[in-house]
Image (tube, rainbow, N blue to C red):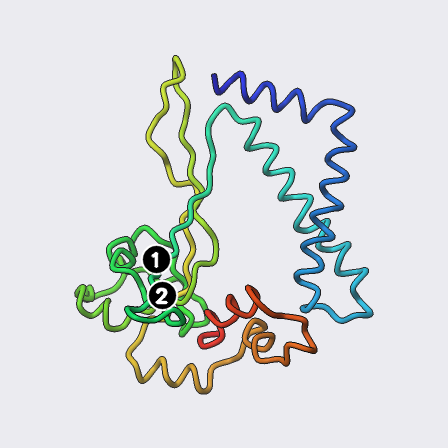
Amino acid sequence: MRSWVSEAYNAIFSAKEFSHVRSKARQRLTGQLSEIFRVFCKKERFEWFVHGFETECVIPAMALYEKLQCSVHHYYLDITPFIVWSPGSNTQYEASPEFIDNIRDLDCRDLLKHRKAFNLNKMNPQPTKTELYENMTNVCTLTPALYVRQIGRRDAIKEPVVVRRQQMLVAWGNDEKKAKFVKNGERTLIHTVFHTKPERTGISGVESWVGGLTSRWG
């Protein structure tokens, strides 16, 4: 069954008529995404920004999507935020209990160490679960995990295999280190955008909410 699906996709993508559909989709995606991210570009360089966004982001992403669809195996993305709303609050969040239990399977980048990889297996001595709960902060999810389920004979579906682990931004350290970073750490673009006046950026609604999640650690 999967081989038939991949062959069907391959036939569609190879059809001469599909090139027009692909071109329209590329233009639409480029326009929509460029508008979303235009706050990161100076007005006089927006044309250059749009061209770069198309060639460096949209075109490779569409090519990868088509390649995955044509594969005889099943590729899919899966994201787990590992956060829950704090009890009695709809504005504050905290790490879910599953975060610490799954931390060895995640690609964690430590914000307090210039986003270097946090490898729990290389730590000596190994921190206890209590120390992890006290010193590890889940800042946000950067990229979802990519999985593949290989299709064997007679369409037998094998167990999923991780192609790329989910990448997380974390902060590993005691309260003193975290407080020092929040006060004096280098600000990121997201932090700057969040604290810019809404009337100047046009950011509101969902964008402000997302910015709020990262503004403290940005």
Q: Which residue is drawn at 71% across and 54% down?
A: 53
Rendered view: 208 above or below 70: below
Rendered view: 101 above or below 41: above
Q: What is the number of the mark on residue 138?
A: 2
Q: Is residue 80 left or right of residue 195?
A: left
Q: Position of residue 13 (x, y in %)?
A: 68, 27
| Circle 1 or circle 2, nearest the eye | 1
Q: Distance between the residues labelled 1 and 2?
A: 8 Å
Q: Which residue is drawn at 24% across and 55% down?
A: 101
> Are circles 1 and 2 on residues that touch, CB within 8 Å?
yes
Q: How many marks?
A: 2
Q: Where is residue 103 in the image (x, y as percent from the top left)?
A: 30, 56
Structural crowding at the residue carrying mark 1, measured as other residues with C-alpha within 10 Å and reported as few (<14), some (14–19) or many (≥20)? some
Q: In this view, does 196 lie to the left or right of 102?
A: right
Q: Which of 138 and 203 is in front in this view?
A: 203
Residue 128 picture quarter: bottom left
Q: Is mark 1 on a helix, strand or loop?
A: loop
Residue 121 picture quarter: bottom left
Q: What residue type is labelled 1?
A: Phe
Q: Which of 197 and 65 is in front in this view?
A: 197
Residue at image mark 1: 82
Q: Is residue 130 left or right of residue 157?
A: left
Q: Position of residue 122 (x, y in %)?
A: 27, 60
Residue 199 picture quarter: bottom right
Q: Which amino acid does label 2 sit on?
A: Asn
Q: Which of 91 and 127 is in front in this view?
A: 91
Q: Is mark 2 on a helix, strand or loop?
A: strand
Structural crowding at the residue carrying mark 2, measured as other residues with C-alpha within 10 Å and reported as few (<14), some (14–19) or many (≥20)? many
Q: Residue at x 67, y 23 (%)?
A: 12
